[in-house]
Image (spheres, rainbow, N blue to C red):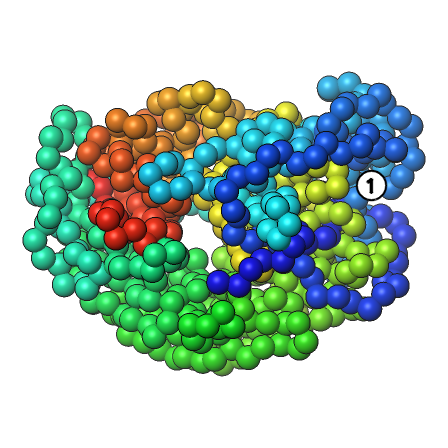
């Protein structure tokens, strides 16, 4: 596997100002990768020196709080371009008595005249075999992207604290909700094992339902992991259709009938290891899988194959060419928006028709030095570019693209030092960004036209479960966060027991309500469905995980237990290096996203639970 670069990407975060952006003074350099695979945890970063000028609030507080200072500098937003290029909502004083995140002096806020809060916590390994992934915490306790050793940068579970200016604004779109009929799956007490990856089924070597207590769910079926190299292998993606539960692992894609786990259409194999997949599927259950060109260290992630999740039929295939100088396919990202597959290289992207594989458009270098380095899909197609590397106008830019033509619908410029790290939601658009120099982070929401909507405006340690990317940013690599049209649902850090889920009003950035986990373990939002938030409560050492339902409206947000996984699977759930999970039609699906390659372990790939 190629080694990640030595530094995190540079870029910025900011609201529109009145002056045009500066032109870069240097020739563009290849953007540095953002979030490589982390080594074992390191100690906290060195304490930075006290700032010489007041830090910008809204993104985190300095290591040693400073007294209030008069406005001395512009905030982190720069001039917005594109069809919606007008000053944003912070052209007037805000609440903090010093330069704020949107480039204007601000007044004392509800927390007094002081800088905002939040260091990006130290990066952590997202877990190791046999242990649950650690949560994040306050200062230097989470898994946010900062430099690890001399050659690695990682972004994983987010933690930290934010004081932020909040804005009015509204979004009249209806909540993104999908009806669930909640059928009651039936199963015998003996789950169906799918063997060693052959997809042929066979006798069950262990009964995970043995000793199941009253009230505990059944393991409807489970899948043993295929053989993997000693160094481990990726097992990306998990897609549930009306017919099949589909999972990729190492060099294969497996499909199982949702009810009993018997093979749905067998197994699709690839000549080399799978290196990327589309996390979303199309409306008619199509995905694209990428696999490597060979086995050497110089192998590229450039072989693309379309796949039908319901039949296993292979559609079109193609080889993705490298781009210009430094624009490689060693690591790629993929996403689906409507009928478009967006494939991101290190400095550009190419859009393909998901039905035919025909190229729709290229997204390449634009302006004087802007290189598209990451894309996010789903309800909208979002592009993030690194601009002016090494120059005085070095920054990140975010754009929405028409998924069929590539036309830019709007552009949002971020100030130098702010990096667009994650999209917690694409529609509505909610962005997590970091500033390594300031040891700060920010969560902001944007309107459909790209204008600023709000940002999280209260002191909290949030802890979604996020992975990492190799040589590129993974904008859609977080689990445990959900949204509808008006609300963002974020888990807090568990401090010695239960955590909370906070419902954040996207119009104001303020908390609507919060609810504590019903167990002494972290509760992670999954999705909003039929007026309720569905969440996964993680297992303890002697009890399986839970699926709960939380009403999103009204005044009673008490979690209602939908499913209690049996104690017999607690060790399996805890043992996953990292995991994917989903609730579909009354069944809970859980899978690992990383195989350990340990031949001595009875490693599981995927489990389905039901009543």
Q: Is residue 394 left or right of residue 52?
A: left
Taking 109 as reference, is 444 above or below it?
Answer: below
The residue lying at 43 percent from left, 58 percent from top is: 280
Q: Position of residue 157 (x, y in %)?
A: 52, 39
Image coordinates of residue 520 in percent, x first then y, are 37, 22
Quarter of the image holding residue 108?
Answer: top right
> What residue do we see at 27% from left, 35% from top?
571
Using the image, determine if residue 451 lies above or below residue 572. Answer: below
Foreground pick, 153 / 260 = 153
* Residue at disc 1, secondary structure: loop
Left or right of 509: which side holds 462?
left
Residue 24 visible? The answer is yes
The total of numbered circles placed on residues is 1
The picture places residue 523, in percent across and down from the top left corner, at 41, 31
Q: Nearer the viewer, residue 148 or 370?
A: 148
Q: Can you give x and y, in whole percent of width and height, for residue 153 in the image?
A: 60, 49
Left or right, 428 with reference to 132: right
Classify residue 209 as left or right of residue 114. left
- Residue nearest the viewer, comparing 523 with 456: 523
- Residue hosting label 1: 75
Residue drawn where x is 88% and y is 33% of the image: 52
Against 251, residue 183 (above or below) is above
Task: State the residue at coordinates (55%, 29%).
Answer: 137
When the figure is inspected, residue 58 is found, relative to residue 608, above or below; the finding is above
Asked where in the image residue 267 lies, by quadrant, the reply is bottom left
CA neighbours of label 1 inside 10 A, class few (<14), some (14 to 19), many (20+): many
Q: Is residue 105 visible?
A: no
Quadrant occupied by the C terminus:
top left
């Amino acid at each position: 596997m190629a080694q990640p670069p030595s530094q995190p990407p540079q870029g910025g975060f900011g609201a529109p100002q009145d002056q045009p952006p500066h032109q870069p003074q240097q020739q563009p350099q290849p953007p540095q990768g953002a979030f490589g695979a982390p080594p074992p945890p390191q100690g906290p970063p060195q304490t930075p020196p006290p700032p010489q000028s007041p830090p910008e609030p809204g993104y985190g507080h300095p290591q040693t709080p400073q007294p209030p200072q008069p406005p001395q500098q512009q905030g982190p937003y720069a001039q917005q371009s594109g069809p919606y290029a007008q000053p944003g909502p912070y052209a007037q004083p805000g609440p903090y008595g010093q330069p704020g995140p949107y480039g204007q002096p601000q007044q004392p806020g509800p927390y007094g005249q002081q800088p905002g809060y939040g260091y990006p916590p130290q990066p952590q390994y997202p877990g190791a075999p046999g242990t649950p992934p650690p949560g994040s915490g306050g200062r230097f306790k989470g898994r946010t992207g900062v430099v690890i050793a001399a050659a690695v940068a990682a972004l994983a579970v987010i933690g930290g604290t934010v004081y932020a200016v909040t804005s009015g604004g509204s979004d009249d779109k209806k909540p993104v909700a999908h009806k669930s009929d909640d059928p009651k799956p039936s199963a015998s007490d003996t789950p169906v094992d799918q063997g060693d990856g052959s997809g042929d089924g066979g006798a069950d070597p262990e009964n995970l339902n043995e000793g199941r207590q009253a009230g505990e769910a059944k393991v409807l079926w489970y899948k043993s992991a295929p053989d993997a190299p000693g160094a481990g292998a990726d097992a990306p993606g998990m897609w549930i259709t009306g017919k099949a539960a589909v999972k990729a692992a190492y060099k294969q894609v497996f499909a199982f009938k949702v009810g009993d786990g018997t093979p749905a259409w067998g197994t699709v194999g690839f000549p080399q290891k799978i290196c990327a997949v589309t996390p979303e599927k199309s409306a008619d259950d199509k995905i694209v899988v990428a696999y490597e060109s060979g086995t050497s260290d110089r192998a590229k992630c450039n072989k693309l194959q379309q796949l039908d999740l319901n039949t296993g039929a292979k559609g079109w295939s193609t080889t993705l060419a490298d781009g210009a100088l430094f624009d490689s396919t060693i690591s790629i990202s993929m996403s689906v928006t409507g009928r478009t597959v967006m494939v991101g290289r290190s400095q550009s992207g190419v859009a393909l028709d998901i039905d035919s594989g025909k190229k729709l458009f290229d997204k390449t270098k634009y302006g004087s030095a802007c290189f598209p380095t990451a894309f996010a899909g789903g309800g909208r197609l979002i592009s993030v570019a690194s601009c002016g590397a090494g120059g005085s106008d070095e920054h990140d830019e975010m754009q929405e693209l028409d998924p069929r033509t590539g036309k830019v619908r709007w552009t949002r410029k971020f100030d130098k030092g702010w990096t667009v790290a994650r999209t917690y939601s694409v529609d509505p658009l909610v962005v997590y960004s970091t500033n390594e120099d300031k040891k700060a982070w920010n969560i902001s929401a944007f309107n459909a036209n790209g204008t600023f909507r709000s940002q999280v405006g209260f002191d909290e340690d949030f802890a979604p479960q996020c992975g990492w990317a190799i040589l590129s940013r993974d904008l859609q690599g977080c689990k445990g966060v959900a949204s509808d049209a008006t609300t963002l649902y974020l888990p807090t850090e568990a401090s010695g027991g239960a955590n909370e889920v906070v419902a954040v009003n996207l119009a104001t950035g303020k908390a609507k309500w919060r609810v504590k986990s019903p167990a002494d373990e972290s509760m992670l939002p999954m999705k909003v469905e039929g007026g309720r938030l569905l969440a996964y409560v993680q297992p303890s050492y002697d009890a399986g995980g839970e699926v709960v339902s939380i009403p999103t409206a009204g005044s009673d947000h008490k979690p209602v237990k939908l499913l209690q996984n049996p104690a017999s699977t607690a060790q399996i759930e805890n043992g996953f290096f990292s995991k994917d999970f989903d609730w579909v039609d009354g069944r809970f699906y859980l899978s690992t996203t990383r195989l350990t390659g340990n031949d001595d372990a009875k490693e599981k790939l995927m489990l389905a639970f039901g009543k």
